[in-house]
Structure formats: structure tokens, C-alpha cells
Amino acid sequence: MLRLQNLKPFKNSKHKRKRVGRGLGSGHGVTATRGTKGQNARSGGAKPEWFEGGQNPLYLRIPSKGFTNIFKKEYHIVKLQDLNIFQDNEIITPEKLLKANLIKDLKKEIKILGNGNLTKKIEIHAHKITKKALEKLQKLGSNFVKLPPLKKKFKKTKKSKK
């Protein structure tokens, strides 16, 4: 009958602890299972997993301050006062901003800031706008049209066929 007092471990499942460095009669004397010579045979010779044998280690090769956010979004900044160069009732697109040298290229999204005053009624097509700039536009009766975000620059990896 199976009872608590009759329980015992399976045969050969329990082993004696290996006691090393206890003399020649123990069977593990002299080198104490460390092998002969070498760095790891000596006391204090065991090195951590990240030790690179004298090579400048990884944690010292990596810069210690800051990081680069690969998801950071950069914008072309356009101030309201700069838009006074356009005519009344004109539709301002990113291409027109590029022609007027207010932005450098069409690779970044465009953000309109509320700096300065706008004197003309216009329609602006951009990706973002500040609250202050939007209020100033609405006071003049101007419109703001939000453009869709630009596509991400990250390369897609090919999926393996299963």
C-alpha cells in the first residue's frame, strides 16, 4: 500500500555531493577537478560570462550617455508671419512653400507655428498646426487642410513563405 512513510526516491536518482579539494584519498584531490594549469585552474581565475579576454569589453565600447530615437519625427517649421508673401485667397501647398524657399524639401512633414501675424486670407495645406496658429487663421477667415502623414522610411523585411 502506498503511504507517506513508504515513499522513497527512485534508484540512482540521488547522488552524493562532490566534495573537491579534500586530499588525494577523496578521488578529487591535487587539482580538485579544475584540470592542470591555466587561468581557470588558479584561485580567482574564473571570469564572468561577459569577460572578453583583455579585449575592450562591449559595455565600454557602447556610449554611456543618451540614445537615438529611431521613431523621432522631424518637421519643417513655418511661421505664420512668413506666409504674408503669398496673395489673398491663395491655396498654399507644400510645393508652393518649397518654391518660396520656406522649406528645404518634401521629405519631412510641415508644421505651422503661430509666431507673428498673418494679414491675408489664405488656405493652408500642411500636416500639423499649433492651437495658437489655428486661432489666428480662423479669426481671419482662413482655412487649414490637414494632409495625411508621410510614409515611414523603414524598410520592410521579406516574410518567409511557409
Image (tube, grey):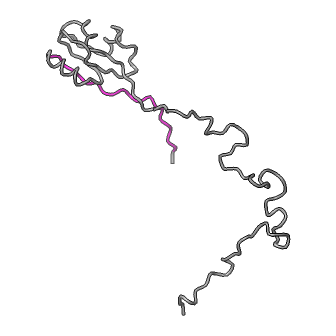
Membership of 145 in magenta stretch: yes
Q: What residue lies at 85% left-to-right and 64% top-to-bottom?
A: 30
* Front-lying residue, 137 or 146: 137
- Answer with the quarter of the image where residue 152 lies: top left
The magenta stretch is: 141-160
Which of the two residues, 95 or 131, is positioned nearer the viewer here? 131
User: x%, y% of residue 115?
Assistant: 26, 16
Left or right placement of residue 117 versus residue 60 in this view:
left
Of the pair 30 and 124, the residue shown nearer to us? 30
Q: Quadrant of the N terminus?
A: bottom right
Q: Position of residue 2 (x, y in %)?
A: 54, 90
x 38%, y 18%: residue: 106
The rendered magenta stretch, by its main secondary structure, is classed as: loop
Q: Quadrant of residue 33?
A: bottom right
Residue 89 magenta-highlighted: no
Residue at left offset 74%, top offset 53%: 44
Residue 28 sits in quarter = bottom right
Q: Is residue 132 left or right of residue 154?
A: left
Q: Is residue 152 left or right of residue 64?
A: left
Total label count? 0
Residue 35 is left or right of residue 103, and the answer is right
Task: Name above or below for residue 133 compared with residue 68.
Answer: above
Residue 135: give x, y in percent of width and height.
18, 21
Q: Is residue 158 above or below residue 72?
A: below
* Above or below 89: residue 126: below
Residue 16: x percent and y percent? 71, 75
Q: Nearer the viewer, residue 75 or 17?
A: 17
